[in-house]
Image (cartoon, coloured by chain):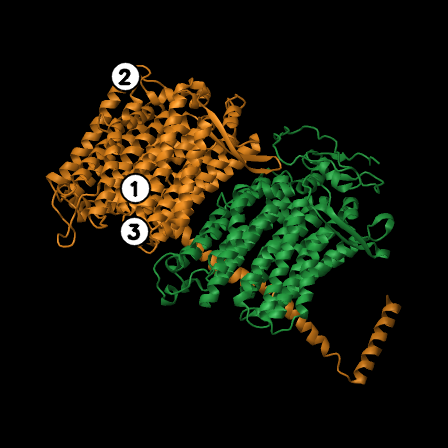
Chain colours: A green, B orange
Amino acid sequence: MLLLLTLLVPLVFALLLCAVPSGKTGLHKTLATVGSVVAFGVSLALWFSFDKTNPGFQFTTNWMWIPSLDIGFRLGIDGMSLLMVVLTTFIFPIAIIASYDSIRDRQKMYYIMILLLQFGLLGVFVSLDTFLFYIFWEVVLIPMYFLIGIWGGKDRIYAAMKFFLYTMAGSLLMLVAIIYLGQYGQNGGFTGDMQKLMTIAPTIPMDAQQWLFLAFALSFCIKVPLFPLHTWLSDAHTQAPTAGSVILAGVMLKMGTYGLIRFNLQLFPQASLHYADLIAVLSVIGIIYGALVAMVQTDIKKLVAYSSVAHMGFVTLGIFSMTAEGVQGAVLQMVNHGLSTGMLFLLIGVIYERRHTREMSEFGGLAKSMPVYATFFFIAVLASVGLPGLNGFVGEYLTLIGAYLSDHLGSKLYAVVAASGVILAAVYLLILFQKMFFGPLAKSENSTLKDLTGREIGMFVPIVILCLWIGFQPNTFLSVSETSSRAVVGVIEGLKGENRYADVAAARLNPNAPPKPVPVQGMENMKIAPPGTPLPPSPVPMPSSTKEPIRVKVPAGGGQVQLPPPKR
Amino acid sequence: MVSTFLPFILLLPLAGFVINGIFGKKLNSERLSGLIGASAVGIGFILSVAIFIELLGLSPDARSVGVNLADWITAGQFSVGFSYLVDPLSVIFLLVITGVGTLIHIYSMGYMHGDPGFSRFFAYLNLFIFMMLNLVLADNLLLTFLGWEGVGLCSFLLIGFWYDRKFEGVGIAWTGDAAKKAFVVNRIGDLGMLIGMFILFSQFGTLNYGQLTQVLSSGAFFPGGSDLLTAAALCLFVGACGKSAQIPLGVWLPDAMAGPTPVSALIHAATMVTAGIFLISRNATLFTLSPTAMAVVTVVAAATALIAATVGLVQNDIKKVLAYSTVSQLGFMFVALGVGAFTAAVFHVVTHAFFKALLFLGSGSVIHGMHEEQDMQKMGGLKKYMPQTYKTYLIGAIAIAGIFPLSGFFSKDEILYHAFNDGGPVLWVIGAVAAFCTAFYMFRSVYLTFDGKERFDHHHVHPHESPASMTIPLWILAVLSVVGGFLGLPAIFGEHIHLLHSWLEPVFAPAYKFYSQHHASHTTELVLMVVSLCIGIAGILLARRVYIQKPGTADKMAAQFPVVHKLLWHKWYMDEVYEVGVVKFIWVTSQSFLYRIFDKKIIDGILHGLANATGAAGRGLRQLQTGVVTNYVTLFVLGILIIVGYLILG
């Protein structure tokens, strides 16, 4: 019920707002703020009652919606979804508070749109039914389209259309894939139940898996965005209002990476192994390309937008390393990027409100006139650069070491080349910082700028605390998703005959069995088998519907490995 | 006691950073800010001495204490904690950092007097100390990396401390440019370190120094070593090159002089730049297992020592001379590492920390007294005005020139001795030439600054001696520069007289398991010693001849060999090569190809093409909907004919 409550709070407040007359702008702000804060509070309750050791989905609801097609209102979360939910509920109050002064017209509609957006985003992260997921996925699109199109900058119509068409193209393919996937339901029937599909999907023939993988991946990778599908992002970011950019970077991009883990890795493990190199290569290109293009931007917001392409490249690389370290790093990096890039967009919003320009050359020497602002900006820059002791480092490091350790990726070079992104990140972000804050106060407009107000400091302090917390004690967050990451990775490793995380993976696929507590902390020593060692039999349990053992190609071991017949 | 004191040593500077960083403006008291900053480090020094004494009381094999303060990162099989290692090697660095650090904090209270950013300065200095201590006390590579990047950050902040001042250099116009350059070049080195960590972790499943050394010294990799070990060692060396300013990553250090002079003394001479030496000493076993890596270290180091020394010959900025001297001396230390003389390298780190900090602080005192003037051509005859500064600076110069019995003589001589024994005569000659240049340019700076004609403008500049808060640290460092050499007396003075050697023996013992050093006779040692002393004296005498006895010789020489002079003056054009070959190249490619053509024209072009094609198709099809019935009937009949035709013929 707690989960349902978290999901519904923004919707309820959006409906409440509809009832408030348009003139009462103060009430709009208050209601929206209260709604988002309540949602955050409820999600905190969720956080504290969540069982980290349980590899299954928790807080589940399962209400039939279209019984003939086995489509239902199914909700539930694991560790990764919980992190995404809390990230969402954390970012929204801040985004709303940031809009107080910058949004002047049609305030009522604005706050309704924001709350609807939150409802849609939360829905995406908590759905356990493919159709429900699709509906929430599309729900997100509409308020964001209006946010950019109505409250955006000069080229807002172009940006909103581009954003909409890009995403639509991907999501329609996803719809086709969802329908096709549903046909594989038990006993030839249709299903939208993702938990059922998780047990069924690995038995889908490889060619069908590949097509399904590609359809889902295209849709998700547009959202991430993965190179070369990123060109909507810079326009959407530059034209969106501050809160729009914050939500876009902070939460919306994570829909893509979340989908990649939830659907692609978990439903099509064989196809994931097959396409891992493709995505890894694109991620690495994205990391370098995004950084190089960010480097030459003169518009601050565009610079940060392109930096997102680079940062999200680390996430996709980590995911498709398909190691526990890489996936854990990716999940944490999703949170990190939300915090640090979200904060950068907030900071840009602050200066835009004061100077109505985002051209880097218009600034310089701001460290003198706005020292507090400069300090917060510098912290955000450092978090983004991936300085150890702040959040970005932990995520990037884990994704990179995951990619390096991965047996599933074709080359160690991915990690090595991607790591050079740390140099480029320092280049473009320090150029940005130095041009804005160092040097003399050349422009007279800049010398009289007001430093941060109490409200603005209040927005940044929680983010900074979280950045430092994740930097020094990331286990608070890593331990939440550790079990889920192991469950995802366990299935894939099982296909290759490794069994480090097999019990976790099995426990997730078989929710009826008594949950086995899984140790989260502590270190087991890596065992590196010498080449030529015969692979141990895979302990991955077969779903009950399987009639024949699957044959999986194991390139490393040479021959083919027969998986044991189902236990039940 | 170690585990009780260590958290304080680490956390006091952090607390100082937080207090001065957040409340410094509110305190609004230089005395209080300075006191907080200096005592945070000073107490740390006292506690460090206590730890040192406790370790002394233990048996040599027991002098290694681990302290685990907290967990850090755990994911999958990867696990690393905030765990620290106090052993003979880290204690030496600990003492140097807190000891010299305290002196420089005290000095800064005088030097930064009146600066609007006074408390900010002390906040940064304390943060630096915290990060540096993490670097050397860590028991695993990742925690070292935290400190490693952290000191880089502080270096950035402190180089750009006077962020609205101009600073000249290739591609540099403001201090901020120099700060950015330092950070970015260091990050190139950090990339090497990251990759080195990946290799080591994937091979051994741990980043813990103790465990790594244990596995490596188990004999599994000897003989033969492995290419991956060489790769890992070289990657770590790239990191070391970045931080310790070795070729080709040394270009940032001379520009780092844009920061206040105490920063140059603390970070860019005494402590941070020796992090590379620490890293390699810590992983000595890894390096001795890879002869290739050792050879690469030696070659790079020798080239750096020589090239930097030659550049130092012609610079006019007093801090630039010292900067190139630092690069060159770091090269000496790496030469020692490259030939397996780890103790000698650490020894030189210690003595260099004394005399180079002394020289930098001395130059700072001069700059302070000369109203921010750094050009030695506009000084001269200052010994009359600042006798304390002159005397201490002279002591530092004698020490670095390698004159018996000052500290520099012993440490440099030990390195040259090992270079001769384990590296061969060529390496020794390179070292000797660099040592000669060192003696020459150091005394050139002494004579140009303190001797000869007064070349400054008497109307505007009134040189004066610095306050006691500055001269007392100078004298303490001067004393240390004189006596520091007794930490490591050579074997000809007696058996087991090299204190540092016996102290560090347990740390480096595993590294020597598969690596043996040559030992020469006492006669050879004595001959080398006398020769290196003569080289130092010769350098000093030449400088005296050129700058005191026959002033003007230098200009004549420059005019006679314009090519050489230009080459040295432009620092072998290394900055220019980077600026044009790397920075401009990447910039132009990114801007005119990646962004303007690939992103805007190709990707968006395809998308706009698709959108336009869809629109065009719609417009095209609309033409069919004419609303004229005859057209529809015609098409209808045509369609039927085609279908019938297909059915008959097909």
The spot of residue A395 in percent (x, y) is: 56, 45
Labels 2 and 1 within one chain: yes
Residue position marked by numbered label 1 in the rendering: B323
Query: Looking at the image, is B278 positioned above or below residue A339?
Result: above
Residue A104 makes an appearance in the image: yes
Characterize the local packing of mark 2: few (<14), some (14-19) or many (20 or more) Cα atoms within 10 angstroms.
Answer: few
Mark 3 residue crowding within 10 angstroms, few (<14) / some (14–19) / many (20+): few
Q: Earlier in the sequence, mark 2 or mark 3?
A: 3
Local secondary structure at mark 3? loop
- For marks 2 and 1, the one nearer the N-term is 1
Q: Which mark is residue B115?
A: 3
Chain ID, mark 2: B
| Type of amino acid at the residue the image marks with label 3 | Asp
Residue at x 62%, y 63% (from the top left corner): A32
Label 2: which residue? Answer: B492
Q: Chain of mark 1?
A: B
